[in-house]
Image (spheres, grey):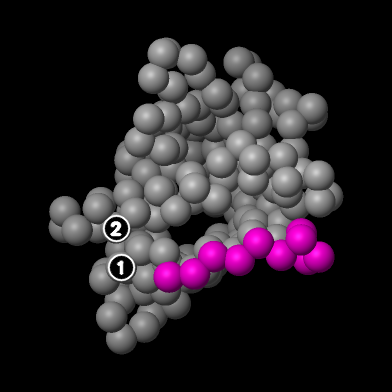
């Protein structure tokens, strides 16, 4: 099933993805909660993710890096601000340096993930909010939209293995 709609709203400074999966809400929640499952879909196929920290609690922190095809690394961080298992997750997301510290020269975002039961399984809505239009445009130019579509397809593949 995967992505059924996307919307980039330059006035609201948001990017919204809606995806549907043929699995129950609790199972889809696990692709967020389990760092080994996160690694299988968070990065694009050519830039797989490795989570070195994943404190999946409100106020918790996650740290990860993605490894490119030539061995180059790009690090990132999350700070979980809301956790209402198994239906809602909100977190701040940004780029990190080699030591895991936030990189202030790159945009950070906030994301709200909602999981709801539907007849065919689960609908996941992801709303990413940007601080400025320039941040939205920069991350969009870096491939965020394509990356999220690809990630959702990887979730679908992961769930199909069950």
Task: Report x, y in % for residue 113.
Answer: 55, 63
Tell me which segment is drawn in magenta. 4-13
Q: Secondary structure at mark 2?
A: helix
65 up-or-down from 9: above or below: above
Looking at the magenta stretch, what is its main secondary structure? strand
Determine the CA span between mark 2 and mark 1. 7 Å
Residue 94 at x, y percent in the picture: 66, 37
Which residue was labeled with disc 1?
A: 1
Q: Is residue 9 magenta?
A: yes
Name which quarter of the figure residue 153 lies in: bottom left
User: Which residue is at 30% across, 68% downward?
Assistant: 1
Q: Are marks 2 and 1 in contact (CB under 8 Å)?
A: yes
Which residue is disc 2 drawn over?
A: 156
10 Å neighbourhood of mark 1: few (<14), some, or many (≥20)?
A: few
- Image side of residue 47 versus residue 11, left or right: left
Quadrant (top left, top right, bottom left, bottom right) of the C terminus: bottom left
Q: Is residue 37 above or below residue 72?
A: below
Q: Is residue 124 above or below residue 33?
A: below
The residue positioned 73% from the left and 26% from the top of the image is 103
Q: Is residue 41 left or right of residue 134?
A: left
């Amino acid at each position: 099933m995967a992505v059924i709609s996307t919307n980039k709203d330059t006035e609201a400074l948001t990017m919204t993805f809606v995806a549907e999966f043929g699995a129950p809400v609790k199972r889809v929640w696990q692709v967020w909660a389990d760092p080994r499952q996160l690694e299988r879909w968070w990065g694009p196929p050519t830039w797989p993710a490795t989570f070195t920290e994943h404190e999946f609690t409100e106020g918790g922190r996650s740290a990860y890096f993605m490894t490119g095809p030539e061995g180059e690394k790009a690090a990132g961080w999350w700070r979980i601000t809301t956790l209402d298992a198994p239906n809602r997750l909100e977190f701040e997301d940004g780029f990190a340096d080699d030591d895991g510290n936030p990189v202030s020269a790159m945009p950070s975002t906030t994301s709200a993930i909602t999981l709801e039961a539907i007849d065919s399984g689960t609908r996941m809505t992801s709303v990413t909010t940007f601080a400025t239009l320039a941040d939205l445009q920069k991350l969009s130019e870096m491939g965020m939209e394509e990356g999220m579509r690809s990630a959702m397809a990887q979730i679908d593949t992961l769930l199909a293995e069950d």
